[in-house]
């Protein structure tokens, strides 16, 4: 049985911790669920193919996965030296101090809140589309969004292992149906046989490569959440690194392979047109391909699983956000009540409730403004979240480098993971930042002015956190 534990702190009072027995598989399930594989294949892939570098788009997903794997080397190397949950902000605070740590925490709260609200908008649109497809009535999209929010609130209030089981079932379904489609496409040879030219430099290095990488990166949002669950993980020093590497590799390979399968299904000469019709609202690259290769019945199953994919995604983000609030409260940055645990469910239930209320407020504001659920709500919120996540990874890589530079004994014999990998990660992430910002209007769906304001939100959150920093102390670092 799991329970909450309390560590005494003479200067600041009790620091509550969550406990649990989550293994590598459970954590990987939640992280991959947050990535919403079916949602990314159905939405990001057409954008990468139709608006990016065409049939070379699969390589964009491989590039994003490679950059994140390099980042993960330093990230997991530092894991034994970070004595608390909190993911990015704990790592940044350990390496760069409390001010930068609080800045990272504020960015994370903004980024996760944005993507969560965006997914609620996407869910409302997708649920209404599903109901009307099967002949049901058309009702306002936001009704489905708020119903989903209520269900997430109930599950998020309870112990994390319940959410892990729910996410696991949903994830197995969506990955299974996509793997079946991939196998069917490659087994039949697609329209013209496997499109090997997808990996040709002449097709990869097109002007739209940046767009492909951008939408690939949005598909990885949340992968670092492995570290958020460290207090609830079984032997976190081993569980967290394994879960992180597995999550990045599985997500990257799955995205790239499925993107290549959809390109192969349409053929080298028709893939861009098929993707463009999806962007124009005249078709659905993923669902139409499923209809052609699996039949109408399995197409309908995939359509339903798209809903479960979105639900799994938003539930995972809810759990991560609640734990960020819990950790910050136990640093005495937020009200102490947020750092309490439910005696029955042994979960940060009050933080979960507060997080639910904040999501209701933001979503309601966007509804009242009259934004479109996809372009207005999902597009703009995904844009803010992507910028925030890339910023967080850059700062975290710098924190890893600085931490081990100041502690040569801890880095002895490990130059690659403690020095080289963080530097290479920063360079790769800076390139990704340029790619994201130079194509930002494609994500937000807004003009240059609105997109600029949205892009500056994460940076403003970081500055605010740094200004307010210095108000909490880290736990003493212990040797690995």
Image (cartoon, helix red, strand yellow):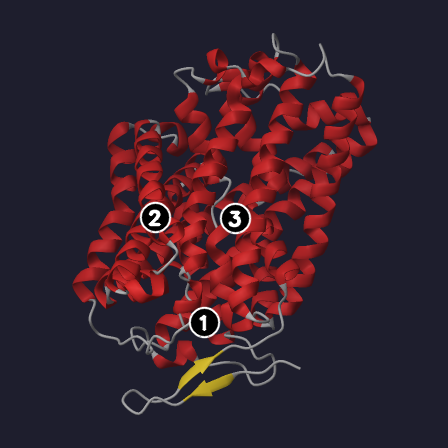
Could you tell whether 53 is left or right of 101 in the image? right
Q: Please tell me which residue is depicted at 65% across the width and 56% down the height of the picture.
A: 167
Q: Return the residue found at the far front.
A: 413
Decide which of tag 2 and tag 1 comes sooner along the chain. 1
Please, is residue 200 above or below residue 142 in the view? above
Instruction: Label 1: state its secondary structure.
Output: helix
10 Å crowding of disc 2: few (<14), some (14-19), many (20+) = many
Give the label on residue 120, or none. 3
Q: Which of the two marks, 2 or 3, is nearer to us in this view?
A: 2
Q: Label 1: how many residues lie within 10 Å, few (<14), some (14-19) or many (20+)?
A: many
235 lies above or below 289: below
Report whether 197 appears left or right of 322: right
Q: Is residue 196 left or right of residue 116?
A: right
The residue tagged with tag 3: helix, strand or loop? helix
User: Residue at the spot x=62%, y=61% of the render?
Assistant: 24
Mark 3 or mark 1: name the one nearer the start of the chain.
3
User: Is residue 299 toward the left or the right of residue 124 in the image?
Assistant: right
Q: Nearer the viewer, residue 237 or 47?
A: 237
Query: In the drawing, what numbered circle is on residue 422?
Result: 2
Contact (Cβ within 8 Å) of mark 2 with mark 3: no
Q: Which residue was labeled with disc 1?
A: 351
Q: CA distance from mark 2 to mark 1?
A: 33 Å
The answer to which of 140 and 471 lies nearer the viewer is 471
In the image, residue 218 lies at what x, y percent? 46, 39
């Amino acid at each position: 049985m799991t329970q909450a534990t309390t560590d005494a702190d003479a200067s600041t009072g009790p620091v509550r911790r969550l406990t649990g027995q989550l293994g590598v598989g459970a954590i990987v399930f939640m992280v991959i669920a947050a990535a919403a594989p079916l949602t990314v294949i159905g939405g990001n892939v057409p954008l990468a193919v139709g608006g990016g570098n065409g049939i070379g788009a699969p390589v964009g997903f491989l590039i994003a996965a490679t950059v994140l794997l390099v980042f993960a080397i330093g990230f997991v190397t530092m894991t034994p030296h970070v004595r608390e949950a909190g993911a990015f902000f704990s790592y940044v605070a350990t390496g760069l101090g409390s001010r930068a740590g609080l800045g990272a925490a504020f960015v994370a709260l903004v980024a996760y809140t944005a993507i969560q609200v965006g997914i609620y908008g996407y869910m409302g649109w997708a649920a209404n589309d599903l109901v009307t497809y099967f002949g049901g009535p058309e009702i306002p999209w936001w009704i489905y969004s708020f119903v989903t929010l209520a269900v997430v609130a109930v599950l998020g209030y309870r112990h994390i292992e319940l959410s892990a089981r729910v996410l696991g079932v949903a994830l197995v379904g969506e990955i299974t149906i996509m793997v079946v489609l991939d196998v069917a496409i490659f087994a039949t040879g697609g329209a013209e046989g496997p499109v090997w030219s997808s990996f040709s430099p002449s097709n990869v290095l097109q002007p739209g490569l940046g767009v492909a990488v951008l939408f690939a990166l949005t598909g990885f949002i949340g992968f670092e959440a492995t570290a958020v669950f460290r207090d609830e993980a079984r032997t976190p020093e081993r569980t967290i690194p394994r879960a992180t590497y597995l999550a990045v590799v599985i997500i990257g390979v799955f995205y790239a392979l499925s993107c290549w399968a959809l390109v192969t299904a349409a053929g080298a000469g028709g893939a861009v047109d098929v993707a463009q019709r999806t962007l124009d609202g005249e078709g659905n690259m993923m669902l139409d391909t499923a209809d052609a290769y699996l039949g109408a019945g399995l197409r309908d199953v995939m359509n339903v699983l798209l809903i479960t994919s979105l639900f799994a995604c938003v539930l995972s983000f809810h759990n991560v956000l609640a734990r960020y609030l819990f950790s910050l409260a136990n640093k005495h940055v937020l009200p102490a009540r947020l750092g309490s645990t439910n005696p029955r469910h042994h979960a940060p239930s009050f933080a979960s409730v507060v997080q639910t209320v904040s999501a209701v407020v933001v979503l309601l504001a966007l509804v009242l403004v009259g934004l479109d659920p996809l372009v207005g709500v999902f597009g703009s919120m995904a844009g803010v979240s992507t910028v925030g996540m890339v910023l967080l990874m850059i700062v975290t890589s710098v924190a890893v480098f600085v931490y081990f530079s100041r502690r040569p004994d801890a880095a002895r014999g490990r130059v690659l993971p403690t020095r080289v990998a963080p530097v290479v990660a920063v360079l790769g992430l800076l390139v990704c930042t340029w790619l994201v910002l130079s194509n930002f209007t494609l994500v937000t769906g807004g003009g240059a002015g609105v997109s600029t304001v949205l892009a500056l939100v994460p940076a403003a959150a970081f500055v605010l956190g740094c200004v307010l920093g210095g108000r909490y102390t880290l736990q003493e670092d212990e040797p690995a």
